[in-house]
Each structure stands twice: as C-alpha cells, then as structure tokens.
C-alpha cells in the first residue's frame, strides 16, 4: 500500500536503492543507467523508479535536501518497502586539501550539527553515524577494479547550507573532508533498522580554493560515481 510520501505498491521497489537528493537526478539515473526502468512514484514531484542493472533489480529515489527530508523517504523505504541496501549518490563541497575537485568521496563516517541526533540520543551522547563496512569495502574494491580514485573518510552533514558561523577550520583540523546535508540521517536510520547504507559523492566545489566544477567535469565525475555505486549496489 502507498505511504504518505511514496505512491508505490509493495514489491514495486527493489531491496537495492540509490538515493540522489534531486528527483530529476533520479529520473536521469533511471533513464541512463538502468534497463527497463519504470516510475513508481511522483508524489510531490519526488520521483522514484525501478529497473535493472546487469540483470539485478535496482531502484532510484529522490530524497529532497537535508536530513529531515531524507529521513522521511528512508524511513518509508526501509520499513514499508523493505529496502536493505541504500546508497546515497550526491554532491559535496570539499573542505580539505586531501580532497580535490572532481574526486569521488566516500563517507566512512558522517559528523553532524543536526538537532535530530539530540532528539534521538539525548544531550549526553554524541552518536557516530557510520557507513556499513561491507558496502564501504565493496565500493572501494569496485573503484580499484575500475581504476577510479576515491577518497574515504569523515564528512560533515550540515543542517544549514548558507551558514556564516560554521567553523570550517576546526572541522578541517579534525579531518572532515567534505560537506553535504543528508548522510548522518541515512546512516542513523540504517543502523536503527540493521540495514546497509553508504554515501558516495562527487566533489562539485572546493571550499578552500573556491573552485567549482564545469558542467562537463561534473558529468564525468558523476559517471565515475555512478559506476562505483551501481557495482556496489549489485554486489552480494
Ligand atoms: N554545502 C553543503 N552541501 C553541499 C555543498 C556545500 O558546500 N556542496 C554540495 N553539497
């Protein structure tokens, strides 16, 4: 039965799912990377599709921006539609000199300033949202066998995109590699439900140097990220 935010029937959505923030990115992925993809939802124009990759059923679903929006979709995908391997495919801003424009970044951990974490864990606990190790290992192996460079480490899942007060120097000092807005929520819900989750990003802009990808560079890195994400999604 359809949920409040996903207009699909049980069985319409695959256990393996890719999660871009942008619903039109979900459409692009479905049309360009999956075979025989069919739309299963367009509630609020947040699009979802199921098709196959190398013969394995794979879905792709937009999540919107930010942890609260992602958590709505991920909760319903896990608890109502039985999703078991959830891979966020997004963009991030690089914060560290170890990370370069056009790199593919994988979030081993996701530090956050989101108050949602306090509502789950209370004030005394600073939970460390982590990637599923099995998916992380598969993604790194997929990148190696495709001869693609990836950087693995801690990202910052920020609640506020336009934040004049965020202390990027301190985050950098403690090894934060990039900033995005969703992965801490994904990892926390996946851990709660004992399912697997991973966040993979293309570096679209660099906060230290002010550089930003051209449209063409974005496209190439996007292809690299998608190859890694899809090979990871279908690996057993
Ligand atoms: N901040 C937050 N999220 C992002 C950024 C950023 O600079 N770039 C891409 N996603």
Image: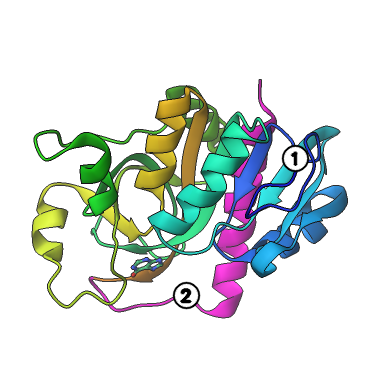
Classified by dominant secondary structure, the portion drawn in magenta counts as helix
Please indicate whether residue 196 sits to the left or right of residue 123 in the image: right
Expressed as whole percent of the image width and height from the top left, the position of residue 181 reads: 37, 59
Judge: label 1 CB < 8 Å from ligand 1.
no
* 2 vs 1, front mark: 1
Residue placed at 68% from the left, 52% from the top? 6
Specify few, some or many for label 2: CA neighbours under 10 Å numbering under 14, 14-19, or 20 or more.
some
Q: Choose the circle earlier in sequence order: 2 or 1.
A: 1
Identify the residue under disc 2.
213
Q: Quadrant of the C terminus?
A: top right
Helix, strand or loop under label 1: loop
* Span highlighted in magenta in the image: 208-236
* Above/below status of 208 relative to 34: below
Identify the residue under disc 1.
13
* Above/below status of 69 relative to 131: below
Does the image show residue 54? yes
Does the image show residue 147? no
Q: Is residue 125 magenta?
A: no
> In which quadrant of the rendered view does residue 122 lie?
top left
The answer for how far apart the CA atoms under marks 2 and 1 are is 33 Å
Expressed as whole percent of the image width and height from the top left, the position of residue 93 reads: 35, 65
Expressed as whole percent of the image width and height from the top left, the position of residue 174 reads: 12, 47
Please indicate whether residue 62 sits to the left or right of residue 161 in the image: right
Q: Is residue 211 magenta?
A: yes
Residue placed at 32% from the left, 62% from the top? 94
Q: Quadrant of the N terminus?
A: top right
Helix, strand or loop under label 2: loop
């Amino acid at each position: 039965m359809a949920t409040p935010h996903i207009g699909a029937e049980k069985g319409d959505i695959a256990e393996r799912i890719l999660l871009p923030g942008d619903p039109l990115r979900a459409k692009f992925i479905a049309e360009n990377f999956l075979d025989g993809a069919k739309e299963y939802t367009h509630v609020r124009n947040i699009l979802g599709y199921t098709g196959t990759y190398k013969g394995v059923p794979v879905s792709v679903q937009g999540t919107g921006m930010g942890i609260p929006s992602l958590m709505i979709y991920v909760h319903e995908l896990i608890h109502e539609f039985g999703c078991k391997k959830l891979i966020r495919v997004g963009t991030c801003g690089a914060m560290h000199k170890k990370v370069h424009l056009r790199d593919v970044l994988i979030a081993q951990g996701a530090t956050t300033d989101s108050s949602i974490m306090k509502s789950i864990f209370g004030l005394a606990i600073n939970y460390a949202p982590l990637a599923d190790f099995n998916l992380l290992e598969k993604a790194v192996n997929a990148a190696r066998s495709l001869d693609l460079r990836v950087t693995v480490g801690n990202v910052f899942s920020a609640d506020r995109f336009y934040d004049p007060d965020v202390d990027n120097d301190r985050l950098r000092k403690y090894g934060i590699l990039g900033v995005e807005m969703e992965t801490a929520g994904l990892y926390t819900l996946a851990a709660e439900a004992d399912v697997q989750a991973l966040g993979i990003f293309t570096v679209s802009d660099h906060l230290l140097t002010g550089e930003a990808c051209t449209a063409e560079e974005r496209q190439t890195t996007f292809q690299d990220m998608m190859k890694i994400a899809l090979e990871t999604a279908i690996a057993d």
